[in-house]
Image: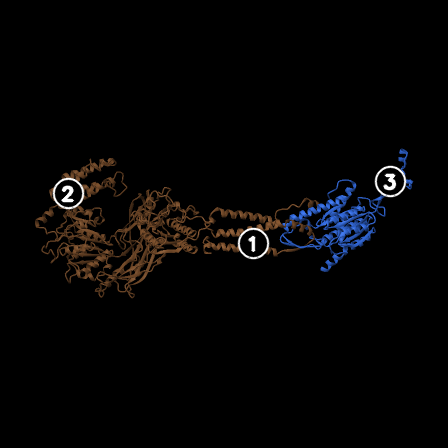
Amino acid sequence: MGGLLGLFLNPWALAAAGLLASIPVIIHLINRMRYRRVRWAAMEFLLAAQKRMKRKMIIEQMLLLASRVLLVLLAGLLLSRWLFSGAPPAPPEDWILHEVVLDDSASMSDTSRDAGAGSDCFALAKDGIRSLGESALSAKTPTRLRLRRASEPDKVLFDEQVGDESLATLVTLMETAKLRAYQVNASEAIGKAKADLLAQYPDQKCKRHLHFYSDMRKTDWEDGSLRGLMNQPEGVLWRVHDCAVPARGEDGRPESHGNLALVALGSESRLALDGQPMECWAKIANYGTQARSAFLAIELNGKRDPSASRQVESLPPGQVVEVRFRIIPSRGESDRASQPAGDPRPNAGEAQDPARQGLSRRAVSSLMAVRVHLENESGEGLAADNARDMLLEVRDRIPLLVVDGTIQPGASTSSDSLYFGAALNPQLFDPLFLETADLEKQDLPSFALVVLLNVGELTDTALARLSEFVRGGGGLAWFTGDRTVPAFCNRAFEQDGLFPLLLAGQPSPSLSEKEREEMRRDESPKVVFPDPASPVVAGLLPFRSVFRHLRMERHWPSIDPSRWSDRAETLLALPSKGWQVAGQRETVKREILDVLALDKTPFTAPSLAPVLPGLEAEIGKVRSRIATQGQFEIVTALEELLRMPPPGSAGQAGATLWDRAELRETQAKLRGLIRKIQQGDPLLVARDVGKGKTLAFLSSAGPASSRGGVSSDSPAPWNEWANGFLSATFPILVQDSLFYLLRQQSDSRSRLFAPQQVAELGTLPNPVVVESLYFPQSEGVVSAASGRGASVAKVAARLLPGTAGNGSPTWSIGIDAQENPGLLTYAVRPDPASPLSVRGGAAFNVDIRESDLERAEKVSIDPRGDNGKPGDATADWFSLESASPSGAGKTPSPGLQRPLDASETPWLILALLALLVIEQFLAWRCSHLQPVQPPAAVKGGA
Amino acid sequence: MMAERDSERKNPRRFLDPAVLAGIGRLELRAHQAVEGFLSGMHPSPFFGHSVEFVQHREYTTGDDIRHLDWKVWSKTDRFYIKQFEAETNLRCTLVVDVSESMGYGSGPMTKREYAATAAASSAWLLLRQQDAVGLVTFDSNIRTILPPRSQSRHLEAIVSGLGNDRPREKTDILAILKKVAQNLPTRGLVAIFSDLLVDREALIKGLQMLRQRKHEVVVFHLMDKDEVDFPFMGPTRFEGMESLPDLLCDPAALRDGYLQELAVYLQEVRRGATKLGVDYQFIRTDEPLDTVLTRFLHEREAIRRGGPVSQG
């Protein structure tokens, strides 16, 4: 029986048909029992007719009955899917195993105007998997299907033998599947899928298909890991399904379409001041092939800021355009009302409790949500990358910790602190001056910045806490002096670059009176700007010409620049002394003339012919300066040359002739030469460390050195920037440097998805989460980031314990991975009884790596190589066409081509139709509904 | 209501339908061939007598009344010839009505027997009105009623009563019946047979032949119900045979074709046999109005007698 049943896909349909076949017979018998009676006189004719037609009638009735029975049986045969092959049930080695990996990265939401509404790569992939399941259901051999998403390589979502019920489960699974908003490493999932596929029924020769449904972007394939997996088949039949929209052409060439994406959003400071304008920027990438324009809409706490929103007229293809805008952060009255009134600083009784002080500082901050989005950009490409969120911490003043290594016990300030404090704008900064010993006790996360003034050696604990502070996003400024210990600074450099460069063992020597007099007479600048375009020195640049009067006597020279210069940025430098050496000077001059030789490359390029006359005039000026002027005049001439605008570019601010591709190399050479001419030892160096920044000023903050320092033998001042002729620019230097430290690193606030740990809370006694809200972008986030408003989803935020560098317990806050980009805000109380709560949050934006929709070439993704033919036994490549409204035109599910069963051949259907026609004819004939003409004799008789 | 209906059914005068009588009242039923009557009337007689209708000359023989000699012929031929004229007599009509069980079938308002009785009563009324003598014979397997021909108008009551007395009973033995009828009719006359003729065909023909050999003019009114002619039955039906015929359970629609063919053969044989014997054969569907049927019949006879075309009305 089992063998017989094996000949049918649905054997029970045949059994049901066998039962149903008796229905016509039963109906016939019932009709025989239900008749009416007529007393009849002319029985003679009736009997004669019956005698004459009896056989014919019986035959016709039997034929009709047989045809009806056959009809039912044949229909049952069709439904039972007779395999017709006579083959026995498939042995285990004929099983088909399908391992499916679904790419659920954000780029799979790509859609095209040609693909129709509601059709994107992900929908196409889900349709494909559904079709695969349906085909597997009708397969001749038993089929097992396993499904996993590329974002969760270890989690198998579906693992069942395909049947009616399991197919329904698969369909439901496909209907509810959602995209992740971050980049997914598909190779890991495919590697695990392949291993699992080979591990199933290892002793049997199953057909093992590995399906990968993806949009096949170039960025996913260019690292070669997927191709490497594919090149090692090891008994796996590769089925690569390209779900890209629009579909590839006949030749497999990818069709591309444009996509505008917001790839970055940042502000000049991660900490905004209430009412103070703040410069922000957004970067828009045009991944298309045509120039586009877009309207950048900006919302602050859910309200559109019309003054900041703007039209971006030109977005060149393949380029990223930075759009800058200015916002005015505001804490809002509601935020102020919700926080403790009065001066948040601790009272006298609490002053001795640094933790309490820290909590008070944290509690007075507010959050402001900044969202930018590209309007009217949802028709094509990704919609998720058309918006970007940023969360700013808004305060009345910037909390600043100043650690002065020269404060004497019992004193509140020193010379350096005095000058440094005077340079701080009290409207913007809220400094706390401490001596070195107090550093360890402070709640560093409650400060935005830490400044070390002429600090000697710190303890390891203090250094570890500083490192943790900076890596978590804080800013650290070093102002050196005679107490600076170069060995300690170099140790700090070794610890994640906490000190941005390596110092020499000794500071520069004190100047003699003669040297001091020579310096006073020297008209050359005492400070040079290695990169005048850097916004950090933008405030000082207008005073560039008067820096010749600056008295800069001592500093800490750097050593071994090859170890730190590539990761650090020199913002200010001392003038080079090499120019004073005739040999070096002449060498540099020759190099400049050689680079600017008009008869050599690149100036001989035909494309430069139109601009060559203008170039020739400017280069002539440089040549004349080289012949007659000093080093800084030459630098000025070279910088003017490098600022030369391109012809006909009056409207493009900042564009130069040297931006042309053929001149870029020459431009870099000239900049190197400028540095060589003017730049000596670095004076102000900055570096990114973790999420924060560190900066070192290699001279003292104040004019005088301390007593008892490493260079206390010299009572002379290190510099007179804070108290001399240029003292007015010292606050500019200090504030610009501090604001530089507050600058966000590239998109550091636009976190990626799925981190469990969102933010570090630092040391808190017994924290309690009192509020955690999520504002998904898909809901059209418009509410205030302070937690009030609509479209808010509650999320379960958890407190995660940790350990600080000094071994003390710390806390951080974490949430589960979010599927929708958006904003998280939370409020944490240090202990349940505390009236204070600390607010924080984070922005979750789509991974910018998902915005580049350029497709991989067919040769990269086709497992058969360039010359493969469709239907390859070991590997195949399928291009899933975008679904038409009718759903037609889809590629049949691969790997399931099997012999047609009898129900799929036309013959059984034709037989059924023929039998139906015969039955209808017999029924019509036996019903005797056809008109019978009475014989002429009857008509005549009548 | 039921009692009223029963009393009406028992009333034999119901066979005298005024509508029918009004339809045929203007017409006359005349014999096609000479009949032997006992009164002079409107029908030709086999005996030559005084009449305006000259028939032939016959050579004078001894004993002939010399009043009938045609002297004009004698003057021309010098021979004696007798002038013979057609004598007119009254008609002696015998109505032979089948009251067997098969006549009890009827799908319409009247059974075949009621239709036959009405037709016979109407004919009797017509004949009596024209001073003809009318007799009645009803039969099934035997003769049930026999009334000799009378021409008195009160004889109509007897005829109508005779028609109403008999109930359908047994099967028909037509040969024996017609033989008895022939023996009981001493003089030539008109024999009108009202029957469905569901009898043995040979016996029927033989019986008719017997009547014709005795010089009777025979008119056969072959009555059939419309169901018997059209056989319109559908669906499984059990036909219960009358007159001792077996039952049959069948799909009548399937048998209709064969039934109609058998019926056609039968009707053709009956018609042919009757025509061959000079019997006036009238096929009548009982769903046809009786006045129409009788009027048409009387018109046809009148037209045939006058040698004109037979009207189809």
Tags 2 and 3 both on a single chain: no
* Chain of the residue on which disc 3 is drawn: B
- Name the residue furthest top: B76
Q: Nearer the viewer, residue B75 or A857?
A: B75
Q: CA distance from mark 2 to mark 3?
A: 179 Å
Q: Secondary structure at mark 1?
A: helix
Q: Which residue is mark 2?
A: A631
Q: Secondary structure at mark 3?
A: strand
Camera-near label (1 vs 3) is 1
Q: Nearer the viewer, residue A267 or A133?
A: A133
**What's the mark number on residue A577?**
none
Q: Nearer the viewer, residue A148 or B8?
A: A148
Percent position (x, y) of residue B230? 67, 49
Q: Which residue is mark 1?
A: A24
Spot the brown chain and give its letter.
Answer: A
Percent position (x, y) of residue A419? 17, 55
